[in-house]
Image (cartoon, rainbow, N blue to C red):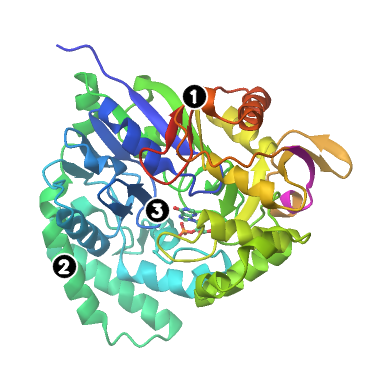
Amino acid sequence: MNAPGYSDVLIGLQYGDEGKAKIIDRIAGEYNVIARFNGGANAGHTVKTDASTVALKQVPSGIFNENVDLYIGSGCAVNAEKLVTELEQIDDLGVSVRDRLRISDQATLIQPHHILLDSLAGGSVGTTYNGIGPAYADRCMRMFGERMLHVRLGDVLDDCDGALRAIAENLQQTCNLYGIDGKDMDEKMQNLRMALDAITPLIERDTLYLQNRVRNGCTVLFEGAQSFMLDVGRGTAPYVTSSHTGAGSPYVGGDISPEYHRMTIGVAKALMSRVGNGPFASEFGGKKSEEYCMEEGGTKNTRSVEESLDTATLLRSEDPFEMGIALRKLSNEYGTGTGRPRRIGMLDLVQLSYAIRLNGVTNLYINKCDLLREFSDTNHGTIPVVTSYNQNSVPIDYVPGTTGSHRSVECYVEQRPGFSEDVRTVRSRADMPTELVTLLEEIEHRVGCSITGIGVGPDRKDHVVW
Ligand code: IMP
């Protein structure tokens, strides 16, 4: 028998969109399996190669590495129709994943009424409208009387007609409750049935599938979705996703036991962003930016409106809100799945240190370091960094647990020397501007974790081993 393998966990440390997929794409070849353990089509994991760009939603990010198998764990919420579309897009790239993707039969199935409920109720949180919250709510609720609220992929294999009857009943009841005309119900059910037929061969019946593979020597990289600050329990509730996103979560939704855990990899970015509502202490333009992004996000016109604005003028503005718009444009921070403008904030080392401590991160990647050069074109020419928090004039070293308390945090901002070099083509630490090296050393010191690599651009090759 082989020596047992191990599992590493990679999570986002901020509010999502830190470039997790790019790091996974880089290191995927070191593992036998890349596995998802939470979330579903709400994720947008972009992988950019010389030949193509693909925004993965449900399929794990190791697709370009042909020797790597892919797994979607029981903690995930699967949208069958979107999965079929995603698999077709991957086929079009000439990449084959169908023979290396397995999906737990215990994974939650997203039902049409979940999407409907999210469209009715998700606006105040600013969800991605993928039905994620309602699906996980049904998982916890389990049944309503005799009616099966929660349907898993395996239930469809057990009794497809019975599962579809339950799903149709859930949709009908939801329509009745909210006075919605269910005229397109038959079409929705028909589409779902076809999608379920298409993914049936991928559903894994062996509930020990991943556990046994690791026991027999395989190595697994767990790919976190949505990031730590959006954790349903530890994040900025209620402005969070509905799954657990921290480093312990793969040992609940990833279908192997914690005995195999080896290390935790954290991904952050040098210029922070957040989509949707909720506290974001270091946001450029604070409340004004939050309201603007939410309002404009609703119309999805922001990008074209912002394209017509003069970036250089905005960047030199003394109004942080305007600076935030310029930085959003320069860093192309518009949602992968939704096109929504992302709210932009300065690097917050209190928040980063908090996330690193709570998740036991040992390997830190910092993406988007190239963007720090943009600060050299601001009026002050320096890089702002949040180094401490005060609450009611008392210093605190943690992120407050409630929205009200979080919103009352006062950030202490320090300025660090800027640099004007374009570092996108630099490939070694020795060739980096001293200002950037010094800043990264300070980050390591303040957050108590060494940096493994930094991102200096969107492409796969835009990376420097640190
Ligand atoms: P949901 O996960 O669609 O229910 O959305 C809940 C919150 O999480 C909203 O603020 C979303 O914008 C945010 N969210 C969900 N998925 C992602 C992601 O992949 N990146 C960043 N934010 C996300």
Who comes first in sequence, dot 1 or dot 3? 3
Residue type marked 3? Ala
* Magenta span contains residue 341: no
Q: Position of residue 135 (x, y in %)?
A: 38, 59
Name the residue type under label 2: Arg
Q: Return the disc, 2 or 3, that comes first in the chain's sequence.
A: 3
The x, y position of residue 425, in whole percent, is 45, 38
Tag 2 and tag 3, C-beta contact below 8 Å:
no
The type of residue carrying mark 1 is Trp
Q: Position of residue 166 (x, y in %)?
A: 25, 67
Label 3 CB sits under 8 Å from any ligand 1 atom: yes
What distance separates the C-alpha of mark 2 from that of mark 3? 24 Å
Taking the image as shown, residue 129 lies to the left or right of residue 221, namely right
Quarter of the picture holding the N terminus:
top left
Residue appearing at x 82%, y 41% in the figure: 390
Q: Name the residue under label 2.
A: 193
Residue 466 tag number? 1
The answer to whether marks 1 and 3 mark residues whose Cβ atoms lie closer than 8 Å is no
Q: Which residue lies furthest to the right in this view?
A: 393
Out of 13 and 466, give the one closest to the viewer.
466
**Which residue, given by chain and number where applicable, does mark 3 sit on?**
43
The crowd level at tag 3 (other Cα within 10 Å; few <14, some 14-19, many 20+) is: many
Quadrant of residue 80 in the image? bottom left
The span shown in magenta is: 406-416
